[in-house]
Amino acid sequence: MSDTGKMPREEGMDHSISLLREGYMYIMNKRHSFNSDIFETRLLGKKAICMGGKESAELFYDSEKFKREGAAPNRAIQTLFGKNGVQALDGQAHKHRKEMFMSIMSPDELIRLTSITKKQWEIAVTNWEAMDKVILYEKTKELLCRTACEWAGIPIHEREIKDLTRDLGAMFESVGAVGPNHWRGRNARNKVEKWMEELIEKVRQRKVNPPENTALHKFSMQRDLEGSLLDTENAAVEVINILRPIVAIAIFINFIVLAVHHYPEERNRLQSSDDKYAQMFIQEVRRFYPFFPFVIAIVKKNFTWNSYQFEEGTLTLLDIYGTNHDPEIWDNPDVFNPTRFSDWEGSPFNFIPQGGGDYFLGHRCAGEWVTIEIMKVSLNFLVNQMEYEVPDQDLSYSIVSMPSIPHSKIIIKNVRRKV
């Protein structure tokens, strides 16, 4: 990094359009051109700092220096996060809310999640055997919606699954969109939040009785720091913060199929290796393919870091995709290589596909364990329990569009169960 004390600065009035045009590569490209892990720019009409790499991640997740309240743009709140969700809290409020999330991530609950996921995969494979072709992205979203609802204790009729899947998908598919697609995400969130608020009221009135270990029950009965029941709207947002991210794992599942297809030697190795290699493969999928482009915070108070001045109130972006492809951290980062995780000791700041820092005290995604467990089950089905063909199609994916999804959404055909 520069030791002059003057932060590299991108000239120009505003670079929001550049961010949209370059997507996942925006911060990474500028870091390369400035030969610096940190630079100043202007986004949404405001001064902003962009940074990446392990040291930057360690700084970014220092809760004494950065806060989340007020950081996310309104368009992301209206589609992806919801108002006053755990992602936007700080201090004791965040700690208290995060403990609520972590309370459902016990070993027993993860085992129950795994069992539900296996059951849904069994049902899906049986159904897919009778289909001429399967659009994997759409079908895995539906599979995961069923999984999420059962695990979270959500009572839902079969006729409602497709609509709920579409609405939960719209929340994360529209976050980088403009125009009609953005409004589709907003309308979907409004619709699902209203439904969830009504459901939570029924739980509180004992008209609906989900199991006590489920998210619906725990979040409905959660009390705030003052001892009052969590506001119904906030409780609804947080239950959706369980459902929506699970459905979004469909993106990673599509990239599992893409990796197995593009690197056929991996299928052979996965079939002949133990669970350790499957874990390494999953971690490499999460590192290699685009998921979150960056995370956002605001400077909490004036401070100096590595001779650079950070001013209170400055919007700050941490480069997630670029950190996971940083040549200072990873050997040949643009090569798909699961064995890189064979001797990886683990760091909460250099491998951050779903954010960094501490699970319990920090802002690292509470659902990361859920993601890994669902990916393990899905990988096992895709390489060991079913066969399928991948016909000619557009398997490319964008590193501009956010989120990135293979253009064909992965079409498979002649699905059959292995005997």
Image (cartoon, rainbow, N blue to C red):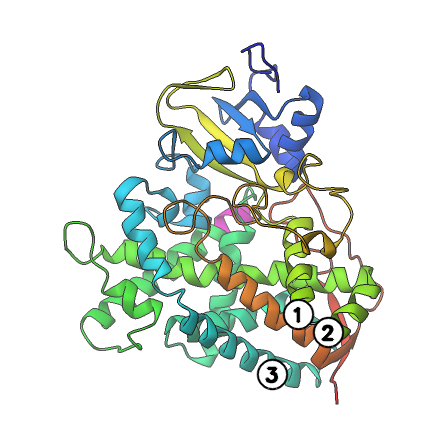
3D distance between C-alphas at marks 2 and 3: 14 Å
In the rendered image, residue 183 lying in the magenta stretch gets the answer yes
N-terminal of the pair, mark 2 or mark 3, is: 3
**Circle 2 SS class:** helix
Tell me what residue is drawn at x 71 percent, y 56 percent: 406
At label 3, the amino acid type is: Glu
Identify the mark nearer the N-term, 1 or 3. 3
- Residue tagged 3: 122
Check the image and report above or below for 15 versus 284: above
The amino acid on which the numbered mark 1 sits, given as a three-letter code, is Leu
Q: Quadrant of residue 89?
A: top left
Image coordinates of residue 359 in percent, x first then y, are 42, 51
Residue 79 within the magenta-colored segment of the rendering = no
**Residue 281 visible in the displayed image:** yes
The residues colored magenta run 180-184
Quarter of the rendering occupied by the C terminus: bottom right
Residue 379 circle label: 1
Nearest the eye: 111 or 273? 273
Give left or right: position of 79 versus 257.
left
102 and 208: which is toward the camera: 102
Quadrant of residue 17 within the rendered picture: top right
Q: Which residue bears the numbered disc 2?
A: 383
**Image coordinates for residue 229, horizontal then vertical, percent:** 18, 58
Q: Main secondary structure of the magenta part?
A: helix
Q: Secondary structure at mark 1?
A: helix
Image side of residue 261 versus residue 183, left or right: right
Residue drawn at x 52%, y 36% is 57
The residue tagged with tag 3: helix, strand or loop? helix
- Tell me what residue is drawn at x 50 percent, y 69 percent: 145
Q: Nearer the viewer, mark 2 or mark 3?
A: 2
Report the amino acid beneath label 2.
Answer: Val
